Amino acid sequence: MKTPDVAEQSSATPPENAQSFGTADPVLDCVRFLARAWRKSDSPAILAAGLPLQNGRMTTQLIEPALARVGVSANPLHQSIARLQPFDFPVVLLRSEQPPLVILRRLNSRNYRVFDPSIGDEKTISARALDARQSVDLLQISPDYSVVQESTGTRFANTKHWFWSAVRGHTRSIVYVLLAAAFVNVFALAFPLFTMNVYDRVLPNSAQTTLWVLAIGIGMVSIFDLLLKLARSGVIEYVGRSIDFRLSSALFDRVLNTPMSSRPSSTGAFISKIGQYEVLREFVAASTLVMFVDLLFLGLFAYIIAIFVGWLVLFPLLAGLIALIITIVIAVLSSKAVKSALAESSARNAVLVEALTGVQSVKASRAEGQLLHRWEAAVLASSHTQDKLRSYQSLATNTTATLSQLSLVGIIVGGSYMFTSGDVTTGSIIAAMMLSNRLIAPIGMIAGTLLKTRAAIEAYRSVDQIMKLPDERPNRPAQAQRVVREGRISFNKVRFTYPGSKSYVLDGISFSVRPGEKIGIIGRIGSGKTTIGRLLVNFHRATEGEVLLDGVDIDQYHPEDLRRAVGLVVQDPEIFNGSVRDNIIMSDPGASEERIMAAARRAGVEGFVSRHPQGYDMPVGERGVLLSGGQRQTIALARTMLVEPKILFLDEPSSSMDLATEKQLIKHLENSLMPDQTVLIATHRYSLLSLVTRMMVLDNGKLVADGPKDEVLKQLRMRADAS
């Protein structure tokens, strides 16, 4: 398929490019330029959402995953620019100390057309300036044809597999490892041959010159063998580290972007499943491939032994066959134990996570003994299974060692008779013994490898279950992008039930909110107040009915754009280990100090930070244990206000505050809430209702009252008096 002329597309709109590029993030500008050139969404929020930015800026390592989000592929190349064919363009030139360049096309042998993010526009540059004849690191850009648009629907499906796509990227390195392993096995023949020649030719004839020639030769082979093994180990470590990084990044990305409704109910079990990735990582990083190559050379070793000692090769072959049968039987018997070990590890981790996350409740309820009993039961079951696995592996190892010794005895006894009859030499017998060990040793490793392989397969299945969880981000690489501009909310006959529950938390509620309205939501515990906020940020999707923002179904918004426009402050916010400043800027790492300070003042953080010697560098501890409940809520509020959302949903924002702090919060909110900002406050405290002009009352998931605040309060008083 012919690729579009990227340069022509981009140069068709130079004024727009000049206005929108040339920012403080040149790598992001390159990504946006390429996305726009291929007529994809160039939204910075979508391209950078969830990526590990450094100081709020994109790095060159993030170009590939950023473009993949909008259906554009970036494939690494290492070659000279001069050797590129016309159909290879565009490419991104990666430079270590300068921003990358997008090379659009070759004008002639001396000049190239490029997009330079430092000026935010295209320019012509000489081949000499690009070092066109030197091999450089490039990224070849093209549409990702694995992202297929279904003409009959709206869904895009990425066919790349999370595991095999990472492995396929290192096919060449894996081939190098296999070749190195093959040469190491060939070199292994040199030592028996050296020994045989010394015993059969050097010693009987006192051929010292021949001895030194053989010694120098075997010394050179040993050096090459060492270098190959070191190179092989280095490549294996590099491939393992690279695959580990890609797989762990993909796994963590999926964990973070799985819809709340699809997450497992047990956090501990979920963490344990994620932890099983370590088993898979160790298997990938291990020298498993090398062992399989060793097995392929068993036939060669058996053939060489037969040349040396004839029918005596039957001893190592028989020992190897028996060892192989025993190993396979042990592997089959242990497969159930491997599966049990992973399940028991999951149960043990679940108990541990629940105990650590709820340690205060455990202590307050005096439940230490109950949890200790659960922990001991889980550890005991796991210990029994591990003992069984170790006994299986020990049986295989010791049996193989014994069979190897018996094979040597057979060669020695049989060789003695053949030596007496003049059929073999002493050197041949010794060489056959050395090769016999080489033949049987890999078979002895099969038991351990099969156990690891079985464990890796089970771990792969567990991780694959996580990777198959749905992704809340829409996989629509089209250029169209929905943005919340007004803040108009509509709930139309919405019903919602949490996964696994049969009762409706919201039962057919309908209401509309105009831009800039300030609304208070009250109701009993469990009436559905918090659920409205969760539906607004699309943590969950309505079971029935529709939720609209600015008249558009909420599912059409990218989660990054939606949650920037709709700020949710939950009742019990999570605070992460670090400083106060670190927690505030989580919503916008690139925010200026002025914006951070302004958001902190509006939320009331300044009140307690100003009294601490470290100010905004004040440590908060893990999960905010060094802070009071009210301080955690103000930090969460500042974190949300930093991005100035169009819609602000406050869920019991003062539930952990004393009256004085609550009054300060109300005062700050009165001064900081913008007239056009839509605000919904779910609360039990009537003092916060001074911020609103309209009230909604929920009862058992139904909207029982909705109107001006004074009228609703009057209705509530009349009902209270009547009852």
Image (cartoon, rainbow, N blue to C red):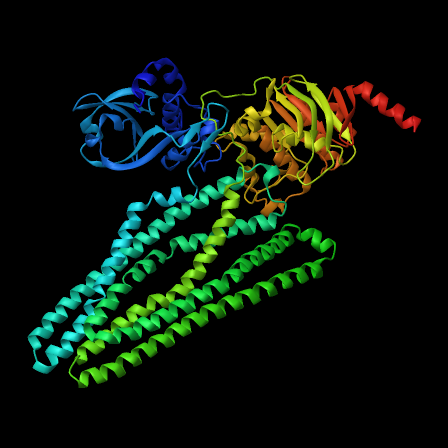
Residue at point 18% right, 28% down? Answer: 128
Q: Is residue 207 left or right of residue 39?
A: left
Residue at point 6% right, 74% down? Answer: 209
Image: 66 above or below 692: below
Image: 507 above or below 338: above
The answer to whether residue 68 of the structure is visible from this angle is: yes
Residue 368 location (% of width, % of height): 70, 59
Q: Is residue 479 left or right of residue 521?
A: left
Quadrant showing the N terminus: top left
Residue 414 location (% of width, % of height): 25, 82
Observer-nearest residue: 600 or 647? Answer: 647
The answer to whether residue 651 of the structure is visible from this angle is: no
Q: Is residue 80 left or right of residue 91?
A: left
Residue at point 92% right, 29% down? Answer: 723
Query: Quick one: which residue is furthest to the bottom in this view?
Result: 420
Residue 699 location (% of width, % of height): 79, 30
Residue 221 location (% of width, % of height): 18, 64
Observer-nearest residue: 403 or 343? Answer: 403
Image: 5 above or below 212: above
Observer-nearest residue: 256 or 292? Answer: 292
State the count of labels.
0
